[in-house]
Amino acid sequence: MKRNTFRFKRVPKLNRPELETACEDFSNIITTSDGIATVYKGTLSSGVEISVVSTAIVALKDWSKRSESIFRKKIDSMSRLNHKNFLNLIGYCEEDEPFTRMMVFEYAPNGSLFEHLHVKELEHLDWTARTRIIMGTAYCLQHMHELNPPIPHFNLTSKEILLTEDYAAKIADVGFWAELVAKSKNPGENESEHSELPPLADVETNVYSFGMLLLETISGKLPFSEDQGLLMNWAAPLLNDRQTFGSLIDPTLKSFKENDLEVICEVIQCCVQQDVCKRPSMREVIQMLRQAIDISPELATPRLSPLWWAELEILSAEAA
């Protein structure tokens, strides 16, 4: 049975042929997660670059009402986000034949923070670049958490922090696509299209994840490795003594600011407290960080913002 199409006031509905052309017949793949989603790079006729995320599900019969509800809810919530350090949603595509559920985002050309921290072949991030990424991420999370209702990130990791041409942070939120697939693979769950959806994340968990992100960023170490185990287990004794803060620093860094490091370590300790009630808000986190790091919201944002709205208006009109 064909489902009713839907539209959102704040996000243009795009058609598949336009996106197919932009993404070179969907051959221009950035990354793929088996059985979950594929991310394509696209170029609009104006030359503006976009990223397109498509579910791996290829048939309407395999797409549950529960998944449809999550998809719609996600578009609605992301349409409320408008921050220069967020990988903003700029359109979506919903067709039943051929089956299509896609979201269209800005494109961040310099990969992820994870790659720049852990892949030796990629460009090294110096201390200034890392602190700018930290602050951009913090400002964006504060914006997300202070919306009414809040929009916490689904699963904040260094893989979800993408980097613009000038290495500013852009928080992506792609991990929730796994939830879509999971809901389609569990037909026993309540299939009511309008059933209440459980929260997929919370702000306190985001604050903990931000603390771990800080630790990964200053140390250059993986959150978990076979040799070392959990990063926090390695770092905990070093965080307990100001004299050993320097031992947390990524050895590939040629220099760092001791005042920055001291404040960052204090913030990490506050964010990763087991008692969620004792964790600071992102507003409080930023107040702490700004005691040492002189990077304003303006300095943390990308210097160039792609002018894609005019092009999308054309696409939207054609899709209609």
Image: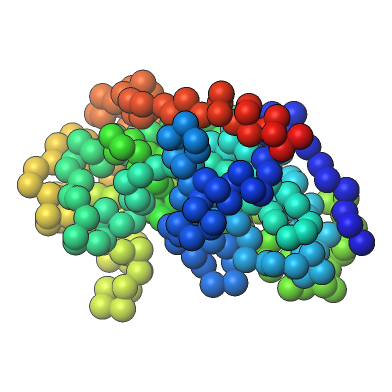
Quick one: quadrant of the C terminus?
Answer: top right
Q: Judge by depth and name the residue closer to the eye, 88 or 118.
A: 88
Say left or right for 163 vs 315.
Answer: left
Q: Quadrant of the N terminus?
A: bottom right
Image check: 98 left or right of 51? Answer: right
Instruction: Name the side, left or right, on which 68 lies relative to 173.
Output: right
Counting from the top left corner in percent of width and height, residue 208 is at 46, 50
Residue 200 lies, in percent from the top left, at: 66, 53
Colour mode of the rendering: rainbow
Image position of 86 with respect to 297: above or below? below
User: From where the camera sits, is residue 237 visible?
Assistant: no
Nearer to me, 303 or 277: 303
Above or below residue 63? Residue 4 is: above
In the displayed structure, does residue 191 sit left or right of residue 74? right
Q: Reply above or below: 175 against 131.
A: below
Number of marks:
0
Task: Tell me: residue 235, above or below residue 90.
Answer: below
Front-lying residue, 170 or 296 = 170
Residue at 54% x, 72% y: name it: 34
Q: Write the residue at 22% across / 55% down.
A: 122
Residue in the image at 73% along x and 49% along y: 94
Q: Position of residue 230 (x, y in %)?
A: 35, 69
| Quarter of the view holding residue 139 | top left
